[in-house]
Image: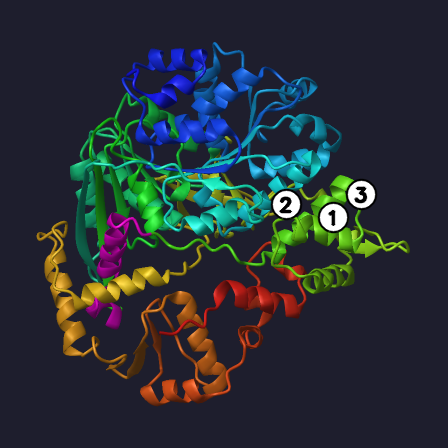
Amino acid sequence: MSRSSASFDLLDERVRRWIWRQGWTSLKDIQENAIPVVLAGNSDVIISASTAGGKTEAAFLPILTSILQNGKSCGYQVLYVSPLKALINDQYRRLSDMTSEMGIDVIPWHGDIDAARKTRSLKNPNGIVIITPESLESFLINRERFVKGAFSSLQYVVIDELHSFIGTERGKQLQSLLSRIEQVTRRHIPRIAMSATFSDYDAVKYFLRNDGLIPCAIPPQGESNHEIKILVKEYISSKDADISIPISQEIYNNLRGSNNLVFTNSRGAAEEFAVQLSDMCEENGVPNEFRVHHGSISKIERESVERDLQRGEHPVTALCTSTLELGVDIGKVKSIAQIGTAISVSGLRQRLGRSGRRDEPSILRVFSIERNNDGLLHDLRSSLVQNIAIIELMREHRYETPSINRYHFSTLIQQILAVIAQFGGFYPKDGWTLLCQNGAFKNVTPELFLELLKSLGEKEVISQLNTGQIVVGKLGERILKSPDFYVAFVSPIDLTVINKANAKRIGMIQYVPQVGKVIILSAKRWLVESFDEATSKVYVSRIKSGGAVMFAGEGVDIDRIIVEKMQKIYLADIIYPYLDERTGAKEHLNHSRIFFHHNNLGETSFLQYGNEDYFFNWAGTKANRTLALLAQYCLNKQCDYGSFYVSNLIAEDIELLRRANKPDLIELASILPRQLKTFQKYDYLLSDKLLNIEYANTYLDLWSD
């Protein structure tokens, strides 16, 4: 290690010895810049660098130094929050290696960890505890008498993969948990956040700590000259042409023999391609290197795929969803592929970061798919152009703005019940002060909080004593006893699929299948033998042909920056060098631009296509959803919409809407049936007023240019 490193000299000698054993010749820029800031311990810190860019060491080299310098204490010194059990297990192994000769305890804490091990740790809490938000919620409720002692000596809170929490119910739960801990400890504990995909740091700072009571530092990550190789291929799907076959053939020809990740936008697509690739291996008499990884296959199979990727003893290409998007240790991955349309800049960047470790280039293949029965979208080659837009935004380091101002009433309901379970009850003013004024739900006014309590009281979720104290009600008791109470987000209703031959669990599906039907799961075909309604188990046996996937899915809102970039691509004449000529990607982009200009879409926002009228505003899904509702409210017109257009609108309609007395977004939300606004776990407990407020705040946007 170069002695010119000022940050290296700040580290404890035992930490420096660990660095020497790794054979490092220097610290990475992010580590050099983060060490003094983290070590100072007087601010929150956002550590942003690419996957495998040294973020964990940037945080923990100074954290371990601080622990060693301060000595052992009665209580955990570091609370490390991670979004996945698999990530906890990875980081436990990693930190255990770092601390093996330092005398610092590391304890993983989640549902799969033995209860006796947790109890032993609580008898003498110290060092680092690594935990999920759900397990932290359970800790605060079920081990309330230990909370103050366990967290009284906290020096740092570390949040891994922060981007995965922002704007989600789970993220709001985490914010509330950290606020509740600080109110118990009566001090502000520095929060260290790690992620690879930040650009709007003001929003990230606010999410990390919404009271701004201590400063937030962002150490420079330094310049990166890491090489990225990109190839975009274009495929046209039709009734007579199954494009999954040529895509599978490309994957088979180019990815066999190395470790790769192939991302799809759904579990069903991952299964379909995995089983097709498995068939190709069997037809060619070669070992099957293609596996599937998503949240509906068994834990044993998921961990087997992760382990085989990590060990690298034989080639594995995993067909996966976002389950492998986060930083689970999968070792060296040669390349990344995306099948279909990328839906977010941050997501694609996170996926790309899984390859290119150890001074090798990151390789991205995108298999863009157009459907020739999509009419206008096909002529505009919208999938191809959206993929180009996301790639270009990624190259410019521009990501979606995090959603940080939602109400999250569903999670507030969970937190109200959690606080009652932890403390026995609260007075309304105290509850609002704890959870809203001084907590995570700062945009919830006293009036809205009382409206929520009223709604919960009417449904017997809570009850109010003669003293005015809020306690749990009959329905609330049932909710608290539910095994998934600690989970803030919606858990899909899953049916367990069992191999009848050996009674082993294969995975989960979301619909009751017909007996005799062939389903695809875990990259294999299964004949449904029977369904046990009492136990929600589907019994199956292996079969060689046929099959269909059976997973629930949901649409995704496309951010405004993506469609604005798409418009600029149509207007430009740039030929992107990563577009594949052999599959016609360059030619298709040219055709889309010809169509765009032929219809004068650079000058007008209106197009008649076939028998349909379209209004193009390039404003994103939320804005177009709002415009479609306005047309229904003001003009009594039913309109479909996408990310950059609204159908069934002409120039006269837009002029009428501009002049109309428009409702506010809450009133606009009220025209939708209740069932179309109930998305989150406890939304069904909200009054119509609160449900409309939540929907308007989350899904509508009156933006106009």
Q: Which residue is mark 1?
A: 478
- Circle 1 Cα neighbour tier, 10 Å, few/some/many (<14 / 14–19 / ≥20): few
Residue type at mark 2 is: Ala
Q: CA distance from mark 1 to mark 3?
A: 16 Å
- Circle 2 Cα neighbour tier, 10 Å, few/some/many (<14 / 14–19 / ≥20): few
Which image quadrant: the C terminus? bottom left
Left or right relative to 558: residue 95: right
Identify the mark nearer the N-term, 3 or 2: 3
Q: Viewer-proximal residue, 131 or 442?
A: 442
**Which segment did they paint magenta?**
375-398
Which numbered mark, 1 or 3, is in the foreground of this view?
A: 3
Left or right relative to 436: residue 584: left
Number of callouts: 3
The secondary structure type at the circle numbered 1 is: helix
Which residue lies at the image location 78% right of the left edge and 60% below the top edge?
457
Residue type at mark 3 is: Gly
Which numbered mark, 3 or 2, is in the foreground of this view?
A: 3
Whether residue 381 is visible to the viewer of this picture, yes or no, is no
Instruction: Give the number of the disc on residue 424.
Output: 3
Instruction: Give the number of the disc on residue 534.
Output: 2
Chief secondary structure of the magenta portion: helix
Whether residue 462 is visible to the viewer of this picture, yes or no, is yes
Identify the mark nearer the N-term, 1 or 2: 1
Which residue lies at the image location 57% right of the left edge and 67% below the top edge?
675
Identify the mark nearer the N-term, 1 or 3: 3
Say if 108 sits above or below 553 in the image.
above
| The image quarter in which residue 449 lies | bottom right
> Residue 352: x percent and y percent?
28, 41
Which image quadrant: the N terminus? top left
Residue type at mark 1 is: Arg
Residue 394 forms part of the magenta stretch = yes
